[in-house]
Amino acid sequence: MEDVIHLQTQLLHYKVSLFKEGYLNDQFKELESLEDESNPKFVEEVVAIFFEDSHRLINELTKALEQKCIDFKKVDAYVHQLKGSSSSIGANKVQMACIAFRNYCHDMNIQGCLKCLQHVKEEFALVKNKLETLFKVEKEFLDANASNPII
């Protein structure tokens, strides 16, 4: 019983810290509100799609910025997609990094784009790690709660 309460407290504090530190915004809460008994892993599934899509887009951005003649419209389109998908799950810091990135695309500033690409990669890696940790702690809590139901 104490383990369940400890895990619940840990989960709550961790989740609050993700919002306080700006990794997530209210859109993530909206996503959570769509989860129910008929689809208990909805958030995890949507976030998994975000991870896959973001990984692909970051690879495309890397390739596009390695070209001798950079197509800034193409780069901007990839950044726009990444901004949209990060916005849809509430990955706030990734979304903000994409906004700055798009400004450099519009200015056709290769150095700014390369710097922003690195920043986007870092923010994506951080939010991915934090969300994976969140899902792990949630699973531990659910498993502990299932084996020690409160009567």
Image: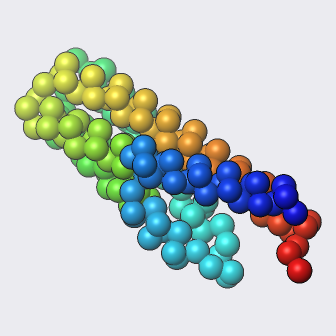
Residues 46 and 142: in front is 142
Question: Residue 141 falls in which quadrant of the image?
Answer: bottom right
Residue farthest along the left direction in this orientation: 107
Between 38 and 6, the residue placed more toward the observer is 6
**Residue at 36 percent of width and 49 percent of height:** 92
- Is residue 82 visible in the rendered structure shown here? no
Which of the pair 3/85 is nearer the observer?
3
Total labels: the figure holds 0
| Residue in view at x 19 percent, y 19 percent | 111
Horizontal relation, residue 58 to residue 70: left or right? right
Residue sitting at the far front: 2
Residue 88 percent location from the top left of the image? 38, 61
Q: Is residue 29 above or below residue 79?
A: below
The furthest residue to the right: 147
Quadrant (top left, top right, bottom left, bottom right) of the N terminus:
bottom right
Q: Please say if 141 is above or below 131.
A: below
Residue 132 location, x and y as percent?
Answer: 62, 46
Residue 30 seen by the camera:
yes
Name the residue rendered at 68%, 81% in the picture: 37
Which quadrant holds the C terminus? bottom right
Q: Residue at x 11, y 29 (%)?
A: 108
Image color mode: rainbow
Instruction: Please indicate whether residue 31 sits to the left or right of residue 98 in the image.
Output: right
Q: Quadrant of residue 36?
A: bottom right
The percent position of residue 117, horizontal first and vertical second, equals 32, 29
